Image (cartoon, grey):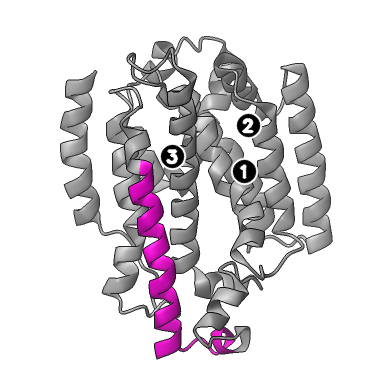
């Protein structure tokens, strides 16, 4: 509740919505939640609101325990999406997640189009099972990941030195998109096996084929030399995008930088864990260890305190 007071969120019903978003963050996004704790308290609820919205939509699409058919999920997502988009237009919501989201969007003037793009990508997950090229994948990843970075920038804020110059905002936005894409690609690399269980192959088919790997090869769930080579190619892309985003992070408000630097290290660090398990993505789930989280979070915490 101290975070809500610090953020000047005082309405009891609105507080309940923000707390539900925080619950979803703490339950499902442990690394993301850890990074969020590095932000000053008055910024955290708004990040929770964005996560809660994204997570709730993702649950509709990917809840493997659900008894709903694909058609029923499509109807549910479509109805919920239409209501949220309508709420974004009117600036009012009665939805248990939407209330916090709409409040956050209004406070920070986050463009409506970002949420439209996100929900479009969630709908794509219900009908598209593979992407032939990187360009076609990027249509999905823009909505599922890049726009989340764009939504975050107004909340994180730019350093005082850069706030009055629109070119710095554009640079920060570009970095946010690249980092969001890097996070998403790192997840795709880690989750090749899990995504196959959902009937999907996210990493581009033509890039698998460059290394002599077909979807049938992936379905065998045995890591070969060709699959390793293809994964190394994707890992190099993640690291390149991460490096390209670094300069943009330096444009952010000083009290936001430790959070994003830690998130970058931990999320992109997933590919390090894939290497550590010798690319055995079908047998093990590459996870960031508690020790690594501690090594990243502790110095980031002290830096965050100094920067406030």
**Image side of residue 52 versus residue 82, left or right:** left
Does residue 229 show up? yes
Q: Quadrant of the C terminus?
A: top left
Please give the residue where the numbered disc 1 appears in the rendered image. Answer: 56
Residue at the (46%, 9%) spot, across then down: 8
Report the predominant secondary structure element of the magenta stretch.
helix
Please give the residue where the numbered disc 2 appears in the rendered image. Answer: 97
Residue at the (64%, 22%) spot, across then down: 102
- Please state the extent of the stretch shown in magenta in the rendering: 217-245
**Position in image of residue 15 (x %, y %):** 53, 19
Residue 258 occupies quadrant: top left
Q: Is residue 94 magenta?
A: no
Circles 2, 1 touching at the beta carbon (< 8 Å): yes
**Position in image of residue 230 (x %, y %):** 45, 78
Q: Disc 2 or 3, which lies upstream in sequence? A: 2
Q: Disc 2 or 1, which lies upstream in sequence? A: 1
Residue at the (21%, 46%) spot, across then down: 296
Q: Is residue 242 magenta?
A: yes
**Position in image of residue 139 (x %, y %):** 66, 53
């Amino acid at each position: 509740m101290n975070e809500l007071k610090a953020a000047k969120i005082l309405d009891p019903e609105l507080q309940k919505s923000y707390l539900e978003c925080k619950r979803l963050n703490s339950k499902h996004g442990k690394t993301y939640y850890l990074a969020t704790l590095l932000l000053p308290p008055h910024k955290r609820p708004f990040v929770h609101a964005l996560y809660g919205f994204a997570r709730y939509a993702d649950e509709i699409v990917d809840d493997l325990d659900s008894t709903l058919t694909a058609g029923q999920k499509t109807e549910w997502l479509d109805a919920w999406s239409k209501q949220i988009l309508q709420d974004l237009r009117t600036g009012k919501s009665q939805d248990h997640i939407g209330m916090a989201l709409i409040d956050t969007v209004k406070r920070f003037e986050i463009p409506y189009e970002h949420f439209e793009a996100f929900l479009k990508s969630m709908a794509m997950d219900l009908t598209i099972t593979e992407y032939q090229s990187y360009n076609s994948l990027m249509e999905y990843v823009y909505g599922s990941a890049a726009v989340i970075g764009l939504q975050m920038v107004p909340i994180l804020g730019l350093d005082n030195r850069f706030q009055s110059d629109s070119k710095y905002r554009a640079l920060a936005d570009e970095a946010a998109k690249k980092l969001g894409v890097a996070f998403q690609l790192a997840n795709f690399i880690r989750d090749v096996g899990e995504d196959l269980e959902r009937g999907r192959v996210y990493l581009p088919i033509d890039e698998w084929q460059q290394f002599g790997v077909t979807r049938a090869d992936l379905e065998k769930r045995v890591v070969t030399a060709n699959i390793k080579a293809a994964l190394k190619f994707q890992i190099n892309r993640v690291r390149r995008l991460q490096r390209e985003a670094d300069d943009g992070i330096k444009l952010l408000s000083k009290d936001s930088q430790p959070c994003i630097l830690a998130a970058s290290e931990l999320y992109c660090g997933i590919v390090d864990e894939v290497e550590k398990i010798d690319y055995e993505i079908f047998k093990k789930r590459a996870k960031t260890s508690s020790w690594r989280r501690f090594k990243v979070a502790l110095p980031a915490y002290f830096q965050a305190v100094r920067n406030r």
